[in-house]
Image (cartoon, rainbow, N blue to C red):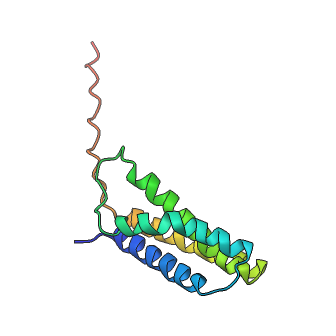
């Protein structure tokens, strides 16, 4: 069964793929659109793989770091696309995306059960 992060990875990878597909049809690209393609060229294939592979459950894993970096690259690519239409559009998209990401992370952290075992109570020797 897929977890939430796999769905997020798949959705963001699909967004990058659709964006690049649309950009391929253009005769000329602005600098912001070229930058968007650069970001998507790294994030889209890797996030696509992440949508099929379940995240490892050990705490010292590379997965959360890679997941965060790749999502930031995809977000940067989408922001660059909106920046093409103007600075205001790019900033609005970036702000809305950051707020949505904060909401998602907060909701995900709250819904994830704590698997850390409780600490053993310290036993103090009886006072003599």
Query: Is 124 located above or below residue 112 in the figure?
Result: above
Residue at the extreme front: 27
Note whether residue 37 is visible. Answer: yes
State the image quarter where residue 72 is shown: bottom right
Horizontally, is 72 left or right of 29 in the view? left
Foreground pick, 42 / 58: 42
How many numbered dots are placed on residues in this image? Answer: 0
Note whether residue 98 is visible. Answer: no
Residue at x 50% of width, y 83% of height? 18
Horizontally, is 7 left or right of 115 in the view? right
Residue at x 50% of width, y 61% of height? 70
Residue at the extreme right: 87
Foreground pick, 100 / 45: 45
Query: Is 50 located above or below residue 92 in the figure?
Result: above
How far from the left and from the top, in percent, is residue 48? 39, 70
State the image quarter where residue 91 is shown: bottom right
Query: Is 112 located above or below residue 25 in the figure?
Result: above
Residue at x 54% of width, y 74% of height? 100
Residue at x 73% of width, y 84% of height? 85
How far from the left and from the top, in percent, is residue 55? 31, 59
Query: Is 3 located above or below residue 128 in the figure?
Result: below
Horizontally, is 89 left or right of 97 in the view? right
Q: Which quadrant: the N terminus?
A: bottom left
State the image quarter where residue 66 is shown: bottom left
How far from the left and from the top, in percent, is residue 95? 66, 73
Foreground pick, 119 / 17: 17
How far from the left and from the top, in percent, is residue 47? 42, 66
Residue at the extreme left: 1
């Amino acid at each position: 069964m897929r977890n939430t992060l796999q769905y997020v990875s798949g959705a963001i990878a699909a967004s990058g793929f659709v964006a690049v597909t649309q950009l391929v049809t253009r005769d000329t690209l602005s600098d912001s659109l070229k930058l968007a393609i650069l970001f998507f060229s790294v994030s889209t294939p890797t996030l696509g793989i992440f949508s099929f592979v379940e995240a490892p459950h050990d705490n010292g894993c590379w997965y959360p770091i890679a997941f965060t970096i790749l999502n930031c690259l995809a977000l940067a690519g989408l922001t660059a696309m909106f920046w093409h239409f103007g600075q205001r559009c790019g900033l609005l998209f970036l702000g809305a995306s950051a707020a949505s990401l904060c909401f998602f992370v907060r909701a995900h952290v709250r819904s994830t059960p704590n698997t850390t075992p409780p600490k053993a109570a310290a036993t103090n020797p009886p006072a003599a």
